[in-house]
Amino acid sequence: MIVTENLTKWFKRKTKYSWANRNADEIVAVDHVNIHIKKGEIYGLLGPNGAGKTTLVKMLTTLILPTLGTASVNGYDILAKPKQVRTSIGLVTGHERSFYFRLSGQQNLEFFGMLFGMKKKILKERSDKLLKRVGLYEARNLKFMKYSEGMRKKLSLVRALLIDPPVYLLDEPTAGIDPFSARVIRETIQELSQEGKTILLTTHDMHEAEKLCNRIGILAKGRLIREDTPLALRETINKSKIVVELQQNPPEAFFSEIKNLDSVSHVAMGNPNLQIFCEKQTDTINEVVRTIAAFGVKIKSINVELPSLEEAFISLTRKK
């Protein structure tokens, strides 16, 4: 449903003097990116600020043209059939300024619905249904300028849903809004995926990415450096935390023995949990169990915690 082929975008570095721009350096915002997002998939695009996420989304919407390469959305090439691409997508951006501030939420939807070519009766039925879906129906007659940030984001999502497109490009749809509004938007995203819609989601919220996305691509300096499931990305970091719940407090010599194990980097003792940070998970568990047994300490439970997605993201992007 969304395929990019060596998608690349360069920008000229702007200088103070226009005559110097002709020889200015080029900034590579997106560098030969290849992704393939399947029907019904939620694909998360993560990256530091300036990694190229928004530029990539803009190329997929045909708002800007690629320097090299191409992409297709819903089977339509962004260069050969831009009109068909635009009618196939619902776009939500993190900083929505395209609504008319003196019009109500309902009036804004009517305006954009007419631009989409929707019939008045169908538009009214569709907008009412969607406003109720996101909890904005009671505020439909309120002027947009009086909407909170969360309400504005939800109205932006409703506008994207109006024509029921097969593909959604969501650029930080929950950035800077209250937890309740963010939850409504996330639940709607999950429902869209269940309906078979294809979704490209950019976000800085690692919890959101892990909860929603089937796969995640990580951009750094314009390049796609890693692509996998959230769990697989966490497993790329060769570090784990072993949490051991003990039935009694061990002697001091026990801690020294654990700390001296080759793969152990740090040990923290809580009450009653022992936290062991290590690199080689399986070997370390066996060594820890043997050490505990040697000191005659009884184990209540033992669990392994993988690094978080945030830790994996920082580790992967720090190398670039």
Image (tube, rainbow, N blue to C red):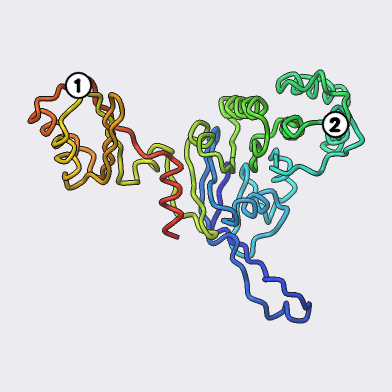
Mark nearer the N terminus (2 vs 1): 2
The quarter of the displayed image where residue 246 is located = top left
Assign a secondary structure to mark 2. Answer: helix
Instruction: Report whether 43 appears left or right of 165.
Output: left
Labels 2, 1: front one:
1
Q: Depth check: give the residue in front, 63 or 207.
A: 207
Amino acid type for the residue under numbered disc 1? Gln
Q: Nearer the viewer, residue 296 or 13?
A: 296
Report the number of numbered marks: 2
- Which residue is nearer to you in this view: 124 or 201? 201
Q: Residue at x 69, y 59 (%)?
A: 65
Residue bearing the label numbered 1? 248
Residue 87 is marked as none
Amino acid type at mark 2: Lys
The residue shown at (81%, 31%) is: 147
Identify which residue is drawn at 65% across, 47% down: 76
Q: Residue at x 69, y 46 (%)?
A: 85
- Residue 42 location in percent, x, y? 54, 36
The reply to whether the C-beta atoms of the residues labelled 2 and 1 are less than 8 Å apart is: no
Q: Residues within 10 Å of mark 1 (few under 14, many from 20)?
A: few
Q: Is residue 180 visible?
A: yes
Looking at the rendered structure, the secondary structure element under dot 1 is: loop
Residue 29 falls left or right of residue 139: left
Check disc 2 and report the residue beneath it. Answer: 146
Residue 313, percent from left and from top: 45, 47
